[in-house]
Image: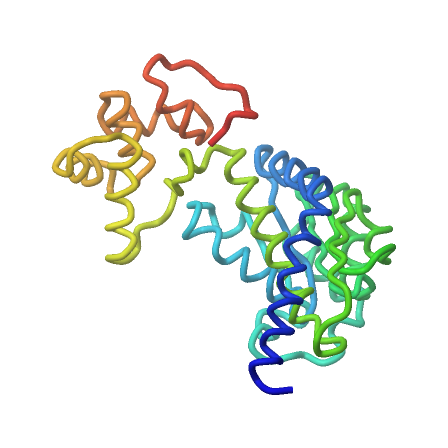
């Protein structure tokens, strides 16, 4: 094959991934509800996986704090072999179910949590062992596999099977299977945060403005959400210590930063409820 032909084949195969994920959306939706329920009751979203699958879960976990303002312990990524396995493979780690038990015990898993086991093959012993242990601890369990009738599916309350088919490079699940798992993780965390009211419309109002780019994004976000003039936006953000959500609630309700923060706390972080000038509540299905 020429390079052009090879890339065309890869691209054609990649186009099938989104359709495979679409077919699994009912199961993904059920998983989102489980994750949301866990986070509402003070539990956690815990990703569990080995190799590429584990790295994808860990990637999603570490991006939640800067994107949604979550505490680092709210979304956790457990990778077989430990964090160091992210950059250097730990051979054989995925074959040991006891590693998953130890990793889950180390974070003191309990019945408030939801564990999402990621295994492209659907049979990774580390993930199977982790899901079984999580179920024994009373946690909600979700599996994500790229094969039908996967072993991990039989260990989960909510099995998600995304049937991506053979890879261009046989057995290299970092390709279509990896893309599919990334798409599912994107959906689980993003949709759960929407349900929790950590966005306003399609704006990620709980982001942490830790650099110049994000400070500018926060300004544009507050302006878009409120229609306020640039000087009013700047004053609100300054009073809110740069927190876009607080500034939005201030401007939409005509309150100061202290009152806006109180409204947000009273609304359990739900932006739309806190920003309602009349103080009314909305149904949870309308969050975001």
Q: In this orientation, does residue 98 appear?
A: no
Residue 204 appears in which quarter of the rendering?
Answer: top left
Q: Is residue 170 above or below residue 162?
A: below
Residue furthest left in the image: 231
Q: Residue at x 60, y 66 (%)?
A: 55
Q: Residue at x 68, y 42 (%)?
A: 31
**Apparent side of residue 37 relative to residue 286 in the rendered image (left or right):** right
Q: Is residue 160 above or below residue 78?
A: above
Closest to the observer: 6 or 20?
6
**Apparent side of residue 176 relative to residue 215 in the rendered image (left or right):** right
Q: Position of residue 108 (x, y in %)?
A: 66, 50
Q: Position of residue 286 (x, y in %)?
A: 51, 25
Q: Is residue 179 above or below residue 85?
A: above
Q: Position of residue 86 (x, y in %)?
A: 58, 72
**Apparent side of residue 19 relative to residue 243 in the rendered image (left or right):** right
Closest to the observer: 183 or 8?
8
Quarter of the N terminus within the rendering: bottom right
Residue furthest bottom in the image: 2
Q: In this orientation, does residue 124 appear?
A: yes
Q: Residue at x 64, y 67 (%)?
A: 12
Q: Position of residue 106 (x, y in %)?
A: 66, 58
Residue 210 appears in which quarter of the rendering?
Answer: bottom left
């Amino acid at each position: 094959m020429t390079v052009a032909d090879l890339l065309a084949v890869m691209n054609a195969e990649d186009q099938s991934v989104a359709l495979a994920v679409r077919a699994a959306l009912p199961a993904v939706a059920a998983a989102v509800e489980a994750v949301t329920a866990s986070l509402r009751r003070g539990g956690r979203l815990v990703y569990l996986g080995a190799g590429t699958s584990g790295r994808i879960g860990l990637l999603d976990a570490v991006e939640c704090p800067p994107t949604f303002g979550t505490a680092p312990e709210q979304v956790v990524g457990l990778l077989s072999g430990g964090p160091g396995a992210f950059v250097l493979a730990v051979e054989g780690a995925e074959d040991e179910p006891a590693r998953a038990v130890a990793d889950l015990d180390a974070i003191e898993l309990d019945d408030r949590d939801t564990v999402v086991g990621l295994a492209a093959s659907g049979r990774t012993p580390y993930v199977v062992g982790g899901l079984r242990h999580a179920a024994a601890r009373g946690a909600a369990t979700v599996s994500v596999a790229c094969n039908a009738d996967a072993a991990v599916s039989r260990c989960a309350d909510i099995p998600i099977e995304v049937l991506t088919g053979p890879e261009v490079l046989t057995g290299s699940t970092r390709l279509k299977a990896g893309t599919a798992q990334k798409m599912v993780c994107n959906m689980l965390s993003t949709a759960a945060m929407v349900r929790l009211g950590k966005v306003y419309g399609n704006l990620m109002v709980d982001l942490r403005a830790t650099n110049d780019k994000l400070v500018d994004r926060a300004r544009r976000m507050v302006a878009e959400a409120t229609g306020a003039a640039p000087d009013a936006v700047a004053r609100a953000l300054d009073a809110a210590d740069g927190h876009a959500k607080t500034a939005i609630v201030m401007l939409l309700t005509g309150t100061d930063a202290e009152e806006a923060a109180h409204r947000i706390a009273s609304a359990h972080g739900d932006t739309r409820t806190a920003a309602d000038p009349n103080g009314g509540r909305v149904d949870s299905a309308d969050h975001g």
